[in-house]
């Protein structure tokens, strides 16, 4: 079985977070993460980038800004985005905004029909 490297980011509109003991701690601004984490190089070296959106605003706007501001188009890495997806329409909008796939978790408890 081949090993895969999956980079996961927990983010809101402005920041990257660390998860410690199920508590989110702000790590840095998204703009600083590009330099601090060498995010472009790290993302180009991984097999998949998973972004868990924990913000209050639309995750569609976040995704569009992420792709516009940062140069993930300089290389190909599949991008999976989750958080705030409460309908099939929201999932479709994320795909059309640049995500390769989406993940849905807690919304399925309240609305299992999302995936029908």
Image (cartoon, rainbow, N blue to C red):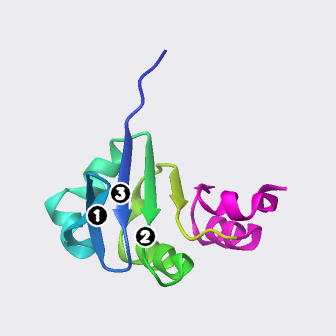
The residue located at (42%, 73%) in the rendering is 66
Q: CA distance from mark 1 to mark 2?
A: 10 Å
User: Could one spot residue 73 in this view of the protein?
Assistant: no
Identify the secondary structure beneath mark 3.
strand
**Disc 2: which residue:** 54
Direction from residue 41 to residue 98 in the image, left or right: right
For residue 52, which quarter of the picture? bottom left
**Disc 1: which residue:** 24
For the C terminus, which image quadrant? Answer: bottom right
Q: Residue furthest right?
A: 116
Q: Residue furthest left?
A: 36
Q: Is residue 58 above or below residue 49?
A: below
**Disc 3: which residue:** 9
Direction from residue 88 to residue 66 in the image, left or right: left
Identify the secondary structure beneath mark 1.
strand
Percent x, y of residue 102: 60, 57
Percent x, y of residue 14: 31, 79
Earlier-in-chain disc, 3 versus 1: 3
Characterize the local packing of mark 3: few (<14), some (14-19) or many (20 or more) Cα atoms within 10 angstroms: some
Q: Is residue 96 above or below residue 20?
A: below
Q: CA distance from mark 3 to mark 1?
A: 12 Å
Identify the secondary structure beneath mark 2.
loop
Percent x, y of residue 41: 26, 51
Q: Nearer the viewer, residue 32 or 111?
A: 111
Characterize the local packing of mark 1: few (<14), some (14-19) or many (20 or more) Cα atoms within 10 angstroms: some
For residue 55, which quarter of the picture? bottom left
Earlier-in-chain disc, 3 versus 2: 3
Q: Which residues are magenta?
A: 87-116
Main secondary structure along the magenta-highlighted residues: helix
């Amino acid at each position: 079985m081949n090993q895969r490297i999956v980079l996961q980011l927990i983010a809101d509109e402005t920041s990257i977070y660390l998860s410690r003991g199920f508590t989110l701690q702000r790590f840095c601004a998204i703009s600083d993460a590009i330099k601090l984490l060498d995010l472009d190089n790290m993302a180009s070296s991984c097999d998949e980038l998973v972004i868990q959106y924990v913000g209050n605003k639309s995750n569609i706007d976040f995704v569009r800004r992420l792709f516009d501001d940062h140069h993930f188009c300089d290389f190909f890495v599949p991008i999976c985005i989750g958080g705030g997806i409460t309908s099939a329409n929201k999932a479709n909008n994320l795909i059309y905004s640049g995500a390769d796939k989406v993940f849905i978790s807690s919304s399925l408890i309240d609305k299992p029909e999302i995936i029908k």
